[in-house]
């Protein structure tokens, strides 16, 4: 069973996630989504250039994020990756603060966690460090990681 099939089994069809993300077309949601993607890319404590490129390509091509301007998403993702690369601990704090802005918006918070799950599993291997990063995103927005199977 593929990763997306498992995600669908948890009641989150990708087309539903795409529709959910499209309705949250706000700067805070876009920033939180890119901060989440950067945290997933840096899940093992550093951002490998190949991992960064692969995640950036995913962001620019995946239907779930198609309602946003790809260039703006890439700029935001690159900014968070740069911060995580130059000082991982401070970069992580800044990324989690951006994500935490969705704490009072539970629908957006759930959607950003789901984006993290999709990005983490995009390569077919949702490893423990990526799961840990998604759990941290859940904590930042006040959601139970068990809801997302992480």
Image (cartoon, helix red, strand yellow):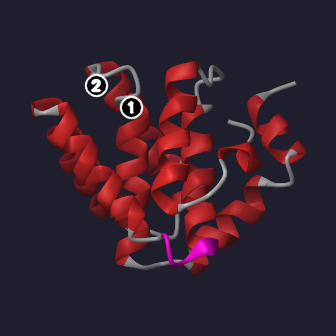
Task: Label 2: state its secondary structure.
Answer: loop
Side of 8 where 130 appears, left or right:
left
Q: Is residue 147 magenta?
A: no
Closer to us: 118 or 101: 101
104 falls in the magenta region: yes
Q: Position of residue 123 (x, y in %)?
A: 58, 25
Instruction: Locate residue 55, reporting x and y percent.
Output: 42, 35
Residue 28: give x, y in percent of width and height: 37, 73
Decide which of tag 2 and tag 1 comes sooner along the chain: 1
In the rendered structure, find residue 47 and report the number of the disc placed on it: 2
Residue at (69% x, 61% y) in the render: 17
> Which residue range is magenta in the image?
103-107
Extreme left residue here?
86
Split into 4 quadrants, where in the image is the C terminus? top right
Residue at the image point whose x is 52% and y is 31% from the top: 132
Q: Main secondary structure of the magenta part?
A: loop
Residue 133 sits above or below residue 65 on the image:
above
Check contact, mark 2 vs mark 1: CB within 8 A: yes
* Residue 109 found in image quarter: bottom right
Q: Nearer the viewer, residue 103 or 9?
A: 103
Residue 14: which quarter of the image? bottom right
Q: Residues within 10 Å of mark 2 (few under 14, many from 20)?
A: many
Q: Residue at x 29, y 49 (%)?
A: 77
């Amino acid at each position: 069973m593929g990763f997306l099939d498992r995600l669908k089994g948890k009641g989150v069809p990708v087309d539903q996630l795409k529709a959910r993300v499209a309705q949250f077309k706000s700067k805070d949601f876009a920033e939180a989504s890119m901060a989440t993607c950067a945290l997933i890319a840096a899940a093992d404590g550093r951002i490998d250039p190949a991992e960064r490129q692969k995640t950036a390509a995913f962001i620019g091509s995946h239907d779930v994020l198609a309602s946003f301007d790809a260039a703006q998403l890439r700029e935001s993702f690159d900014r968070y990756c740069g911060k995580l690369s130059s000082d991982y601990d401070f970069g992580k704090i800044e990324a989690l603060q951006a994500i935490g802005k969705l704490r009072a918006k539970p629908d957006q918070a759930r959607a950003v966690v789901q984006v993290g799950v999709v990005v983490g599993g995009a390569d077919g291997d949702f490893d423990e460090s990526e799961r840990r990063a998604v759990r941290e995103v859940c904590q930042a927005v006040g959601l139970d990681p068990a809801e997302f199977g992480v």
